[in-house]
Image (cartoon, rainbow, N blue to C red):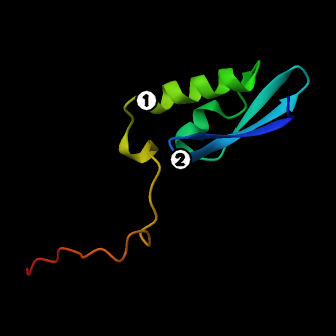
C-alpha cells in the first residue's frame, strides 16, 4: 500500500489521506469535508466510503463546493431591464 492518497468524490478533491503508523489521517481540501479533518481510518477504502456517505447527504448551501464565477463565463447572461 502507498503512504498517501488523494481522495476525490464526484470529481472534487475531497482531501489527502496520509499514513501515520498503522492508520491513515485525513486532511480536508474541500470545505464540505472539513468535518473529517484529522479523522483516522484503518485503510483508504474506509475513508472513501465515509466521505461518499457524507457527500450523499443533503447539505446546506454554504457547505457545498462553489464553482468560481469565471467558469462558464462564455454563457449568455439573462439581464432583465429594470
Q: Position of residue 61 (x, y in %)?
A: 37, 45
From this viewpoint, which residue is outermost toward the left? 82
Q: What residue do we see at 59% from left, 23% from top?
A: 49
Q: What residue do we see at 64% from left, 47% from top?
A: 29
Secondary structure under tag 1 reads helix
Q: Is residue 23 above or below residue 63?
A: above
Q: Do tag 2 and tag 1 residues touch (Cβ < 8 Å)?
A: no
Left or right: residue 19 compared with residue 62: right
Q: Position of residue 47 (x, y in %)?
A: 66, 26
> Looking at the rendering, which quadrant does residue 4 occupy?
top right
From this viewpoint, which residue is outermost toward the front? 1
Tell which of 29 and 10 is nearer to you. Answer: 10
Q: What residue do we see at 24% from left, 76% from top?
A: 76
Left or right: residue 82 compared with residue 77: left
Q: What residue do we see at 58% from left, 23% from top?
A: 50
Name the residue beneath numbered marker 2.
11
Of labels 2 and 1, the one closer to you: 2
Name the residue beneath numbered marker 1.
56
Tell which of 72 and 1 is nearer to you. Answer: 1
Amino acid at each position: 500500500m502507498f503512504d498517501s492518497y488523494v481522495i476525490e468524490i464526484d470529481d472534487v478533491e475531497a482531501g489527502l489521506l496520509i499514513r501515520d503508523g498503522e492508520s491513515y489521517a485525513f486532511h480536508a481540501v474541500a470545505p464540505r469535508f472539513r468535518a473529517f479533518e484529522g479523522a483516522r481510518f484503518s485503510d483508504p477504502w474506509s475513508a472513501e466510503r465515509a466521505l461518499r456517505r457524507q457527500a450523499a447527504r443533503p447539505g446546506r448551501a454554504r457547505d457545498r463546493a462553489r464553482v468560481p464565477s469565471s467558469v462558464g463565463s462564455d454563457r449568455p447572461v439573462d439581464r432583465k431591464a429594470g
